[in-house]
Amino acid sequence: MAEFSIIERYCQGLGADHSETQLGVGDDAAVIRVPDDKELAISVDTMVEGVHFHAGIEPADLAHKLLAVNLSDMAAMGACAQWATLTLTIPNYDEAWLAEFSKTINSVAQQYDLQLIGGDTTQGPLNVSLQIMGVLPLGQSLKRSGAEVGDDVYVSNTIGDAALALKLMSDDFDFRESGHRLLLDAIHRPQPQCELGLGLLDLANSCIDISDGLVADLGHISKQSGVSLELNVASLPLSESFRHVSNSIDYDLALTGGDDYQLAFTAAPCQRAQLEALSTSISVPITQVGRVVEKNTQAIKLCFNDKTYVLRNNAGFEHFS
Ligand code: ADP
Ligand code: MG
């Protein structure tokens, strides 16, 4: 099938409709209008077979994850995602694959009020890339550089589930039989924290989404804010599955495993009640895991209640201190 027919059949009219869209799929470029009191947040994430997903991945899982990882970047900025462009590189024309992929892009994009306004389609090794655009009130983005000494450090929902799932997949673990289906969903169907990100705009001082692991990502906040962070490993939010799947709780995995797509953020202690109210109103748990201190020789200091905590693989940790 010709490239243009693929575009017409599988890439047109996907997701929501926005009144600010002047031109969508079909011309040489899309045209959008940004209101005077708003600015655009723009981000792109690419997913390559063998690097970000395994060969033979369900097209619905791939489509979901591609949107989720990009929506998560918007959430971390406090931006309201509105538009996306999609680069689709496929090895051959597979009607069933394309139909499933396109259907899922459409349903997830609608769920998050995102409109697909353009892209590019080529033949080659499977590779998908999405550029996402969101709007922000002028000058108010949530940055990695805004953490202040005295801030509390928080994490949304639970962490470590995707990393544990990945580890178990290589052991042929039966997720369904064992009742730990939630772990598989964590890796295939991450839920971007869009509502939380929007709510944090007025409350948090800094924010990042956890894609490379909590310690690594908080390392970015430490570096860009010029502060150090102290975390209590005992207070990490871990799912029931994470706690019960193995004999002992693998705290290192929760601290360093990637693909969580939760938000880690810092906020002044005077915001505690407001944060609690936000968390309740959107039904997204948030957990205080530490605090921001004056910059010192250790970017991220870990303790387990009143004892120092040392990661087994110290080399990885040193990279971030
Ligand atoms: P050009 O040759 O000018 O780049 P294309 O033939 O690549 O134009 O694309 C035609 C139209 O289809 C453009 O509006 C482009 O944004 C859109 N498009 C192409 N591929 C995709 C895709 N995978 N998803 C969404 N829109 C796409
Ligand atoms: Mg093109």
Image (cartoon, helix red, strand yellow):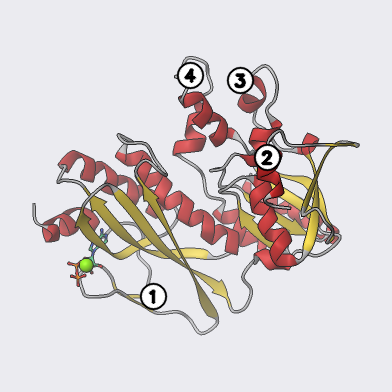
Instruction: From the top left corner, tell me how far across and down residue 9 is, in percent.
Output: 16, 54
Kindly identify which residue carries mark 2: 255
Tell me which label, 1 or 4, sits earlier in the chain.
1
Front residue of 123 and 287: 123
**Residue at the spot 58% in from the left edge and 33% down from the top edge:** 161
The residue tagged 4 is 173
Residue depth check, mark 2 versus mark 1: number of the one nearer the observer: 2
Up the image or down, 140 lies above or below 148; here it is below
Q: Which circle's residue, 2 or 1, is located before the other in the chain? A: 1
Most foreground residue, 35 or 51: 51
| Of marks 1 and 3, the one in the foreground | 3
**Cβ of mark 2 under 8 A from ligand 1:** no
Q: Quarter of the picture for ligand 2?
A: bottom left
Q: Are marks 2 and 3 in contact (CB under 8 Å)?
A: no
Answer whether residue 15 is visible to the viewer in this image. Answer: yes
Q: How crowded is mark 2: few (under 14 residues within 10 Å), some or many (20 or more)?
A: many
Q: In this view, does 143 lie above or below 272?
A: below
Contact, mark 1 vs mark 3 (Cβ under 8 Å): no
Q: In this view, does 222 lie to the left or right of 31?
A: right
Numbered disc 1: secondary structure: loop
For label 3, the residue is: 245
Furthest residue in direction bottom, as rendered: 36
Going from the N terminus, do you reach mark 4 or mark 3 first?
Answer: 4
Is residue 12 in view from this perspective?
A: no
Q: Which element is circle 2 on?
A: helix
How far from the left and from the top, in percent, is residue 273? 81, 54
Q: Label 1: which residue?
A: 20
Q: Which residue lies furthest to the front in this view?
A: 315
Identify the amino acid type marked 4.
Phe
Amino acid type at circle 1 is Glu
